[in-house]
C-alpha cells in the first residue's frame, strides 16, 4: 500500500525528522522507561553520614554490575536498571562490609535502601541484611506492578497480559469494548484499549512495551501482541505525575519483555478451553450449550549466549479457536422479517433472509518474540527485540450496538511487526543516557459477512453489511526517544525528548454501503425507512501525524523521608493539512511523598498535573475523506428516505441522487489538544514486611475531548470535528497488596467513584447541537463500585507431615489462582428509534420524553475465574 501523504504533511515530516536528529543531543521518552532504580543512604550506628562508601549492585540473573559511591550527604543512586533481582554490597574502610540479600526492582519503581554500617571492631564478619520492605517510600503516586508468578500462574482469557490490568486499583472496563478476548486480533470495529482511568475514554491511555509506544494510532487500542511467556512485568497507574509520562490523558500500562539470564530456562505449555467447563453465554438462548474449543500450545526458551555478557529470550504461541455465536433475530419476528425480505421492494438487498440461532465462528492467531541483550563492560547495555503477531477472526467481529443478525457481523485480519532497539550508557554513577528506537507496521482488514446496505430496526434487529466493517488500513510507526538522567547531591535531574512519526494509508469505507433506519417493525415490513445515509466518492486516504514531546524534571530529597517532584512537559502533534495545530500544550507536574519518621509504617502522597493526549486518526479521517471534494454523504429523512429506498430497493445506490445536497465533514478552525487535569492524594501503610494497604483519592477532569457536531442543526448537515467535549471524575480506591512470601501473594482492589461527561466517544453526537449542556450526565465509563480480588497460593505440602506420601507427591507444585470481580451496573442510554429532531446524528442521539442522557443502569455483575 503506497504512502501518498499530502505535500504539506510531507514538508512537516521532513523538517520534523531533521529536528528529531538534533533532539538526540538532548534527552527521555514519550513512553515511560522500562527500567527501575535503587537509591539510598549510608550511615553509621550514630546516624552520621558515611562519605565515599563503595556500593556495588549486582543483577542476580545476568551478573551485570553497577558501582557507585555515597556522596557528601551519604546518598547513592543507581538509575535505569534493568528490572529483576539485585543484591547490594557496601564497603568502607573501618566498617564491616554489608551484603543486602537479593530484592526485586520492578518496572518504574525506585527501591529505597537505607544502610547502617557497623564499625569493623564490633562485627568481624559480613553483615547480611534482609530485602527492603514493600512500602514504596519515594513514589509520589500509587501504582501496582504485576509480573512473574502473578501473571504466569493466574487465569487469563487467551493468555493476554492486558486482562490483568483490570485487577489493578482505580481502573474499570471501558464501555462497549470487546478487545480482551483476543490478544492479537480485532473483534470490534472500534476497539479501544479495553479499560478506563479517571472517567476518561479507553482511547486516552498510554500503552508501551520496552519503553516505546504500542498504541494503535487509529483507534487507541493495543498493537503488537506479546505472548505471556515473554512478559516479565508491567506497571499500571492511573495517576502517575512524572513529566516523562506524555501522549495520553488517561492511565498508563508499561510492560517489559523478558530478558535472557545466565541460567538456561525453557517451557512448553498447552492450554485448552472447552464449553463444558465454561459458564454459559447469557446472550445465547439456545437449548444446547454453544460450542467453544480453544487450543493454545506455546514454547519459550532463554539463556546465555556468552555468560555475564550476551543473552537471548524467545517465545512462540499459537492459538486455534472454534466456537458458535448467536444470531439475535427475535424468534417471534423471524418469519415476518424473512417474508418481507423476499418481496420485490427488497430486491436490491444482498441479505435475503435472517437467522436465529447458533452459527459457526472461529479464530487463529500467532505470536512470536525474540529479544537479545548485550553488556559491554559496565558502561554500555544494548538490547534489540522483534515481535510479530498475526490474527484471523472469522464471522464474529462486532460492528453495531444493536441486536445483530449474523449478516451484520464480519471478519478481521490483523498483522503486526515491531522492531525495537535500545542503548543505555552509564559513564559515571551520576549520569545515565537511554536511547530507544522503534520501527513498526500494523495492518488491519475488516470484511463484512454481507454486502450492500445495512438495514436497522433500532431495539429490534440490524441486518446486512455493518457500516463500519468494510475497511483496510496500514499504520507505519517511526519512533526515537533519547533521555539523560543525572544526580547532583539530593537532586535527581532529567530532561528528554521524543519523536514519533505515524503514516496511515487506509480505505475506511464507513457508510459507503448505505444505511436505512426503520423506526418500527411495521415500517420495515412496509418498506418505509425514516432515515437514509450513504457516502459517495473515494474512500482511500493517506494521513501523516507526528507527535513530539519534550520534558524536564527534578526529584529533590531535602531530607530523608521527603521527596518533592517538579516537572514541565511540552507536547505537540503535527497534523495533516487542513487541521490547525495547537501550541498551548505546556504541562506542569508536581508530586510529593512524605514519610514522617525514618521507620514510620506509612507514607503520605499527593500529586497534580496536566496531561496532553493525541488525536485518534479514525476521528480525523472523516474530514479528509468526506470534505466535499474527495467524498461526501447524502442524508435523507422522512419522505426523502422513502424515495431513496424506492430507488435502492433495500440495497446500495450506485450513484448519488440528483438534486440532493451533500453532507460534508470539516475540522474546527480551533482544534486544541485533548488534555486532563489530575489531582491525587493518598496514604500507604505497611502491614508487615510484605503487605501494604493503600488508599487514594483522585479528581480527574478531561477537556477538549473529540466529538462531531452538526453546525446547521438540520439537513443537509455540516459536520464539524471539534474538541469541545469534557468529562469529570471523583473517586477513591483502596487496595491491599501482598508480594509473594511464604507461598502466598494477593491483590484486593476496591474502586468507588462517579464519572460524568457530555460525550463518551468521538462519534456520539449531541441531542441538541446548539446546547450541549443537555448531554451532561453519567458517562458510559461510569461504574460506581468495583471490587477485584486476585490471589496466588502455592500449597504448602511440605508442612502436611500427617498426610499420606502419595497425597503430598500429588499436590506438590500445585498452585491455586482465583480472580473474583464484582461490579455495579453501568449506564444505559434511552434513545429514540430514529432521528426525530432531524439533526443528522448517526448513531442516533435523539432521546424521547425529554429524558436525560444515560438515565438507566444495567444489572450488577459477578465473575469468578480460577485455575
Image (spheres, grey):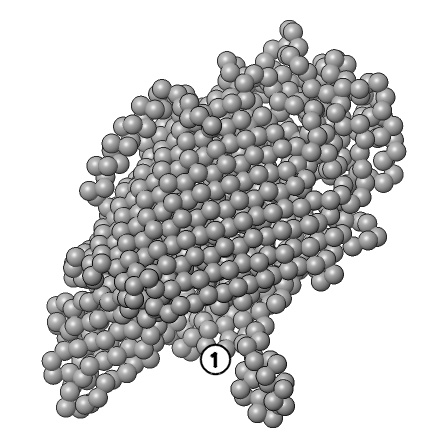
* Disc 1 target residue: 742
Residue at the farthest front position: 305
Near-viewer residue (526 or 255): 255
Residue 523 lies, with reference to residue 693, above or below; the image says above
**What residue is at 40 percent from the left and 29 percent from the top?**
544
Where residue 315 appears, x then y in whole percent?
47, 57
Q: In which quarter of the image is residue 70?
A: bottom left
Q: Where is residue 414 in the image (x, y as percent from the top left)?
A: 54, 40
Q: Residue at x 53, y 86 (%)?
A: 798
Secondary-structure class at tag 1: loop
Q: Residues within 10 Å of mark 1 (few under 14, many from 20)?
A: few
Answer whether residue 826 is visible to the viewer in this image: yes
Image height of 14 relative to 822, above or below: above
Q: Residue at the location (40% across, 59% down)? A: 313
Pick the residue in front: 154 or 710.
154
Q: Is residue 499 left or right of residue 153?
A: left
245 to 807, vertically: above or below: above
Q: Which residue lies furthest to the top in this view?
A: 659
Residue 55: percent from the left, percent from the top? 20, 71
Q: Quadrant of residue 109?
A: bottom left
Q: How many marks?
A: 1
Q: Quadrant of the C terminus?
A: bottom right
Would you say 613 lies left or right of 776 here? left
Q: Which of 699 and 666 is in front in this view?
A: 666
Amino acid at each position: 500500500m503506497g504512502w501518498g501523504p499530502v505535500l504539506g504533511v510531507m514538508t512537516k515530516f521532513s523538517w520534523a525528522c531533521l529536528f528529531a536528529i538534533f533532539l538526540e543531543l538532548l534527552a527521555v521518552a514519550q513512553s515511560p522507561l522500562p527500567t527501575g532504580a535503587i537509591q539510598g543512604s549510608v550511615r553509621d550506628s550514630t546516624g552520621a553520614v558515611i562519605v565515599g562508601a563503595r556500593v556495588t549492585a549486582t543483577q542476580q540473573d545476568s551478573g551485570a554490575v553497577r558501582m557507585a559511591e555515597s556522596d557528601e550527604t551519604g546518598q547513592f543512586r543507581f538509575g535505569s536498571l534493568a528490572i529483576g533481582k539485585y543484591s547490594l554490597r557496601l564497603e568502607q574502610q573501618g566498617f564491616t562490609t554489608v551484603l543486602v540479600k537479593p530484592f526485586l526492582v520492578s518496572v518504574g519503581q525506585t527501591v529505597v535502601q537505607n544502610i547502617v554500617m557497623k564499625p569493623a571492631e564490633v562485627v568481624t564478619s559480613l553483615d547480611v541484611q534482609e530485602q527492603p520492605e514493600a512500602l514504596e517510600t519515594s513514589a509520589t503516586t500509587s501504582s501496582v506492578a504485576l509480573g512473574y508468578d502473578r501473571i504466569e500462574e493466574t487465569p487469563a482469557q487467551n493468555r493476554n497480559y492486558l486482562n490483568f490490568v483490570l485487577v489493578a486499583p482505580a481502573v474499570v472496563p471501558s464501555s462497549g469494548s470487546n478487545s480482551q478476548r483476543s490478544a492479537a486480533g480485532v473483534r470490534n470495529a472500534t476497539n479501544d484499549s479495553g479499560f478506563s482511568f479517571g472517567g476518561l475514554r479507553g482511547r486516552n491511555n498510554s500503552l508501551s512495551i520496552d519503553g516505546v509506544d504500542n498504541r494503535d494510532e487509529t483507534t487507541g487500542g493495543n498493537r503488537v501482541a506479546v505472548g505471556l511467556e515473554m512478559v516479565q512485568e508491567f506497571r499500571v497507574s492511573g495517576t502517575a505525575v512524572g513529566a516523562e509520562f506524555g501522549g495520553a490523558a488517561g492511565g498508563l500500562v508499561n510492560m517489559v519483555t523478558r530478558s535472557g539470564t545466565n541460567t538456561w530456562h525453557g517451557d512448553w505449555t498447552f492450554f485448552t478451553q472447552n464449553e463444558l467447563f465454561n459458564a454459559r453465554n447469557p446472550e445465547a438462548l439456545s437449548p444446547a450449550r454453544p460450542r467453544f474449543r480453544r487450543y493454545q500450545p506455546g514454547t519459550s526458551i532463554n539463556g546465555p549466549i556468552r555468560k555475564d555478557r550476551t543473552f537471548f529470550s524467545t517465545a512462540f504461541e499459537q492459538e486455534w479457536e472454534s466456537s458458535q455465536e448467536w444470531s439475535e433475530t427475535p424468534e417471534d419476528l423471524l418469519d415476518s422479517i424473512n417474508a418481507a425480505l423476499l418481496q420485490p421492494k427488497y430486491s436490491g438487498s444482498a441479505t435475503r433472509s435472517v437467522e436465529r440461532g447458533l452459527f459457526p465462528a472461529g479464530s487463529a492467531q500467532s505470536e512470536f518474540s525474540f529479544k537479545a541483550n548485550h553488556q559491554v563492560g559496565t558502561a554500555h547495555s544494548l538490547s534489540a527485540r522483534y515481535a510479530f503477531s498475526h490474527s484471523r477472526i472469522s464471522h464474529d467481529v462486532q460492528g453495531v450496538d444493536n441486536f445483530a443478525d449474523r449478516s451484520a457481523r464480519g471478519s478481521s485480519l490483523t498483522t503486526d511487526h515491531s522492531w525495537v532497539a535500545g542503548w543505555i550508557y552509564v559513564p559515571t554513577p551520576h549520569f545515565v543516557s537511554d536511547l530507544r528506537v522503534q520501527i513498526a507496521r500494523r495492518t488491519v482488514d475488516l470484511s463484512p459477512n454481507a454486502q450492500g446496505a445495512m438495514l436497522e430496526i433500532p431495539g429490534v434487529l440490524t441486518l446486512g453489511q455493518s457500516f463500519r466493517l468494510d475497511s483496510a488500513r496500514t499504520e507505519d510507526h517511526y519512533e526515537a526517544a533519547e533521555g539523560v538522567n543525572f544526580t547532583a547531591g539530593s537532586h535527581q535531574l532529567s530532561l528528554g525528548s521524543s519523536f514519533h512519526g505515524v503514516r496511515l494509508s487506509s480505505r475506511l469505507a464507513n457508510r459507503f454501503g448505505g444505511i436505512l433506519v426503520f423506526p418500527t417493525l411495521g415500517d420495515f415490513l412496509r418498506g418505509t425507512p425514516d432515515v437514509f445515509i450513504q457516502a459517495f466518492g473515494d474512500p482511500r486516504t493517506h494521513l501523516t501525524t507526528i507527535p513530539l514531546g519534550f520534558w524536564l524534571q527534578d526529584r529533590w530529597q531535602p531530607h530523608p523521608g521527603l521527596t518533592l517532584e517538579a516537572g514541565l512537559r511540552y507536547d505537540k502533534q503535527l497534523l495533516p493539512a487542513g487541521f490547525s495545530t495547537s501550541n498551548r500544550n505546556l504541562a506542569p507536574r508536581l508530586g510529593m511523598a512524605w514519610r514522617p519518621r525514618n521507620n514510620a509504617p506509612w507514607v503520605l502522597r499527593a500529586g497534580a498535573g496536566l496531561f496532553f493526549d493525541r488525536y485518534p486518526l479514525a476521528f480525523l479521517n472523516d474530514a479528509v475523506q468526506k470534505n466535499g471534494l474527495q467524498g461526501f454523504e447524502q442524508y435523507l429523512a422522512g419522505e426523502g428516505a422513502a424515495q431513496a429506498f424506492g430507488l435502492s430497493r433495500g440495497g446500495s445506490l450506485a450513484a448519488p441522487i440528483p438534486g440532493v445536497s451533500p453532507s460534508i465533514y470539516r475540522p474546527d478552525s480551533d482544534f486544541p489538544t485533548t488534555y486532563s487535569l489530575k489531582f491525587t492524594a493518598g496514604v500507604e501503610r505497611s502491614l508487615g514486611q510484605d503487605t501494604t494497604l493503600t488508599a487514594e483519592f483522585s479528581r480527574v477532569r478531561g477537556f477538549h475531548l473529540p466529538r462531531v457536531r452538526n453546525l446547521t442543526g438540520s439537513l443537509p448537515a455540516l459536520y464539524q470535528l471539534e474538541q469541545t467535549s469534557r468529562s469529570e471524575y471523583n473517586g477513591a480506591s483502596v487496595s491491599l497488596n501482598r508480594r509473594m512470601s511464604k507461598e502466598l501473594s494477593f491483590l484486593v482492589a476496591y474502586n468507588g467513584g462517579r464519572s460524568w461527561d457530555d460525550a463518551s466517544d468521538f462519534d456520539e453526537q449531541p441531542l441538541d447541537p446548539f446546547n450541549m449542556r443537555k448531554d451532561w450526565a453519567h458517562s458510559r465509563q461510569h461504574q460506581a463500585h468495583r471490587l477485584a480480588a486476585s490471589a496466588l497460593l502455592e500449597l504448602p505440602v511440605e508442612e502436611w507431615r500427617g498426610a499420606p506420601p502419595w497425597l503430598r507427591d500429588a499436590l506438590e507444585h500445585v498452585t491455586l489462582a482465583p480472580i473474583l470481580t464484582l461490579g455495579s451496573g453501568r449506564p444505559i442510554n434511552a434513545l429514540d428509534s430514529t432521528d426525530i429532531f432531524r439533526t443528522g446524528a448517526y448513531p442516533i442521539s435523539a432521546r424521547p420524553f425529554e429524558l436525560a442522557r444515560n438515565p438507566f443502569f444495567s444489572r450488577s455483575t459477578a465473575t469468578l475465574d480460577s485455575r
